[in-house]
Image (spheres, helix red, strand yellow):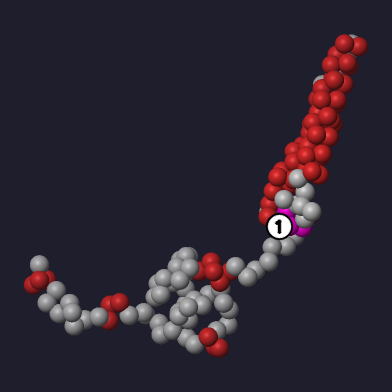
Amino acid sequence: MAHLAPNYEERQEFWKPAVSPRTLPEMETTEQVCQECGTDFIVGSRFCYVCGADRNTNLSDTTVTGLQSWIDFASLRDALGQSNASLVALILGCACVIAAVVTGFVFTATTLLDWQAVQLWRIEWLLGAVAMFAAGFLLKKK
């Protein structure tokens, strides 16, 4: 096998980067250039091919705005000033209120007995919502 690559120790240019790294002051954007060594990222790569640094560490300074901040659980929790358990209880309480409203639209009552059954289901959903809101209030950060 040694006869296949006789000058392997002498030839190290294969592992050198194709483009010389740039210095940090002349960079245009931080998303396209590695913060560690200054080398351009390969399109679609997650790590720098020279030093192995993670490309996503460059994007960690961006802030989440708009609709995405309301979908993000951690930012919603911080914006409302609640703990994880109280935010889950708040979401479940809202789901119970929505279920109580939807119950009235989905089930139609033709007799008095049907109407009483639908009202009983709505009362149960609303009691569940009250219990969830109370739990969320008790679990809220002080």
Q: What element carries label 1?
A: helix
Q: Quadrant of the N terminus?
A: bottom left
Residue 51 drawn above or below residue 115: below
Q: What stretch is highlighted in magenta?
A: 75-79
Foreground residue among 49 and 127: 127
- What is the chief secondary structure element of the magenta stretch? helix
Whether residue 66 appears in this view of the structure is yes
Task: Write down the quadrant of residue 121 in the picture.
Answer: top right
Whether residue 71 appears in this view of the structure is no
Foreground residue among 58 and 4: 58
Total marks drawn? Answer: 1
- From the top left corner, tell me how far across and down residue 73 is, in percent: 68, 52
- From the top left corner, tell me how far across and down residue 5 is, in percent: 14, 74
Give the side of residue 84 with respect to residue 128, left or right.
Answer: left
Give the side of residue 43 with respect to residue 85, left or right.
Answer: left
Question: What residue do we see at 58% from left, 69% from top?
Answer: 59
Task: Write down the quadrant of residue 111 in the picture.
Answer: top right
Q: Which amino acid does label 1 sit on?
A: Ser
Question: What residue do we see at 83% from left, 34% from top?
Answer: 130
Label 1 CA crowd tier, 10 Å (few <14, some 14–19, many 20+): some
Foreground residue among 126 and 69: 126
- From the top left corner, tell me how far across and down residue 94 is, in percent: 79, 39
Give the side of residue 77 with respect to residue 134, left or right.
Answer: left
Give the side of residue 46 with respect to residue 140, left or right.
Answer: left
Question: What residue do we see at 84% from left, 16% from top?
Answer: 117
Question: What residue do we see at 77% from left, 55% from top?
Answer: 81
Which residue appears farthest toward the front when viewing the image? 142
Label 1: which residue?
75
